Amino acid sequence: MGSTYSPNVSKKTRTLNTFGWEADTPYNALPELPPAAELETKAILRLCITARAALAELKATAKIIPNQGVLINTLPKLEAQASMEIENIVTTTDKLFEFQGNEEHADSATKEALQYNRALLEGYKSLRRCPLNTVTAETVCTTIKKAEMRVRNIPGTALRHRRSGKIIYTPPVGEDRLRVLLANWERFLHERETLDPLIRMAVGHYQFEAIHPFTDGNGRTGRVLNSLFLIDKDLLESPILYLSRFFIKRRDDYYRLLLSVTRDAAWEEWILFALRGVEETAGWTLKKVRGIQTLMEQTKAFVRHQLPKVYSHELVQAIFEQPYCRITDLVDAGIAKRQTASTYLKALAGIGVLREDEFGRDKVFVHPKLMQLLIRDDSQVPPYLALPETPGTGTQS
């Protein structure tokens, strides 16, 4: 749930429902977890099996790539872009790579998306120190908003319809009440081990959004926590699942189903929606990872053949980790000193692997095939065009 919505809102949202909820009254009676509803219906359990299988295949395939930085530095940016778009903060994948490390020159939407990407990666690192909890959520939200974000201790937060401006949900108020609900949320995520973790993720995502613990950034924080929870429960090893792709394609359903849980306790429909999202995006991300693997092998073979004196495994890895590669990226990675790094990148541009662009006073070497693979919905990898036989230039580092 963000600060504005556009679901199909019935007249029920303006009147007290059977669960003691009223749209414009703080929902301090929000039920604690687990819900009273049946969470393991036959439909849910069947979908859990296929979603878990899709995640397992993604996890196994991703592990084959020896340098995980190639995936971690690329796929989370797709998640960041889509999650921000759900909140009507729109940027492009190209801009996220172009302005990485140069955020001060970016537009506001790109800056916010890069902050989301940073929050996802820092949250991922934090799991090595402790399991996902309220402090994790505070840290993630603080990074997203680039301001100190703690559990709300003042009233006044309400969620409004994006077009009409009418209040459609007012979350609980009072820091003590919020922390009680968050403590219950933590226990449900980590102690209900008999319940499939994908069901816990779906239920936990609703509950976090309903608690709405921060004055802003709750939707983005909640979607980061989805990825972190899957890693915490060993269903993935890194934050590469592009789940917000599913949510942005079905944004109205996403908001409608969250509200339906509040209004009607419609848990099954929401959980099935979330499980379909995991299954679909795991399959999509799997194809993307395989596409990256294929392109990497093609690029290695092509560069080794065309530039045998320039080629090194580390050089090819660098241009996959940084699709917008700068001379300083090679220097910082210890691949070459500045002059030699420039020679290498220009040589790669000379055979069409990279494209040299001007970026202010700096030169940037873009990896067009990788960027197209990341941007396109399909994961097709066209081969490199053969070049005339020429000796390599430069010297191998």
Image (cartoon, grey):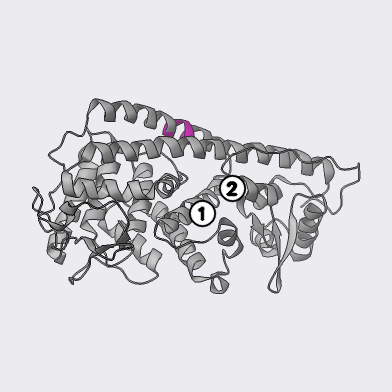
Q: Position of residue 35 (x, y in %)?
A: 15, 41
Q: Which mark is residue 77?
A: 1
Name the residue rendered at 62%, 45% in the picture: 373
Q: For numbered disc 1, what is the local secondary structure?
A: helix
Name the residue rendered at 90%, 46% in the picture: 391
**Residues rendered magenta in the picture:** 55-59
Q: Position of residue 180 (x, y in %)?
A: 14, 56
Q: Quadrant of residue 298?
A: top right
In this view, 177 is above or below 302 = below
**How many other residues sit within 10 Å of disc 2, few (<14), some (14-19) or many (≥20)?**
many
140 or 163, nearer to the observer: 163
Q: Is residue 281 left or right of residue 179?
A: right
Q: Is residue 129 visible?
A: no
Q: What whole-number distance in Å separates the C-alpha atoms at marks 2 and 1?
A: 10 Å
Q: Amino acid at mark 1?
A: Lys
Q: Which mark is residue 223?
A: none
38 or 60, nearer to the observer: 38
Name the residue rendered at 52%, 61% in the picture: 91
**How many other residues sit within 10 Å of disc 1, few (<14), some (14-19) or many (≥20)?**
many
Name the residue rendered at 31%, 66% in the picture: 216
Q: Is residue 150 left or right of residue 107?
A: left
Task: Check contact, mark 2 vs mark 1: CB within 8 A.
Answer: yes
Mark 2 = which residue?
A: 374
395 or 256, nearer to the observer: 256
Q: Position of residue 389 (x, y in %)?
A: 91, 41
Residue 201 part of the magenta-drawn span: no
Q: Position of residue 342 (x, y in %)?
A: 77, 62
Q: Is residue 104 left or right of residue 158?
A: right
